[in-house]
């Protein structure tokens, strides 16, 4: 596969991973985040852990794939933005989101 084809495939893959990550994060927020924080009231079904693992791994894979395929160059800040979503969900959200208290 030539470099152009690799980069094209890489961009398509990155968009798919980003979509998986964003949709999964929203699903996570809607199903098991409350005022007490992320997954604060166990037990949870196995599919909740699988869903969290899937969207988190999808987002964490983006910087590695983009670096491997040399996709971002001057767009390195996009990687930081992508990594911010799992960080915010698992570290910062202890009953609050970035925009304020969780109300559902």
Image (cartoon, grey):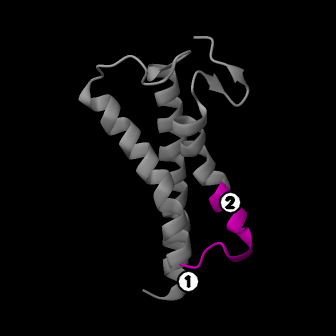
Residue appearing at x 52%, y 61% in the figure: 62
Give the quadrant of the N terminus: bottom left
Q: Where is residue 63 in the image (x, y as percent from the top left)?
A: 54, 65
Give the side of residue 43 with respect to residue 63, left or right: left
Number of disc labels:
2
Q: Is residue 36 above or below residue 70?
A: above
Q: Which residue lies furthest to the left in this view?
A: 46
Residue 78 lies in the magenta stretch: yes
Q: In this rendered view, identify the residue nearer to me: 93 or 71.
A: 93
Provide the residue designation for mark 1: 4
Residue appearing at x 49%, y 69% in the figure: 65
Residue appearing at x 63%, y 11% in the figure: 103
Q: Nearer the viewer, mark 2 or mark 1?
A: 2
Q: Is residue 46 above or below residue 72?
A: above
Q: Is residue 86 above or below residue 94?
A: below
Labels 2 and 1 touching (C-beta < 8 A): no
State the SS at label 1: helix
Q: Position of residue 59 (x, y in %)?
A: 50, 52
Q: Where is residue 19 in the image (x, y as percent from the top left)?
A: 53, 46
Magenta highlight range: 69-80
Residue 98 lies in the magenta stretch: no
Residue count near mark 1 (Cα–Cα under 10 Å), binned few <14, some 14–19, many ≥20? few
Give the side of residue 94 with respect to residue 80, left or right: left
């Amino acid at each position: 596969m030539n470099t152009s084809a690799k980069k094209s495939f890489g961009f398509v893959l990155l968009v798919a991973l980003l979509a998986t990550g964003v949709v999964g994060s929203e699903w996570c927020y809607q199903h098991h985040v409350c005022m007490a924080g992320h997954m604060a009231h166990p037990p949870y079904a196995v599919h909740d852990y699988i869903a969290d693992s899937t969207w988190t791994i999808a987002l964490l894979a983006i910087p590695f794939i983009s670096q491997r395929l040399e996709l971002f160059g001057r767009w390195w800040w996009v990687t930081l933005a992508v990594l911010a979503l799992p960080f915010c969900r698992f570290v910062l959200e202890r009953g609050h989101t970035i925009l304020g208290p969780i109300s559902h």
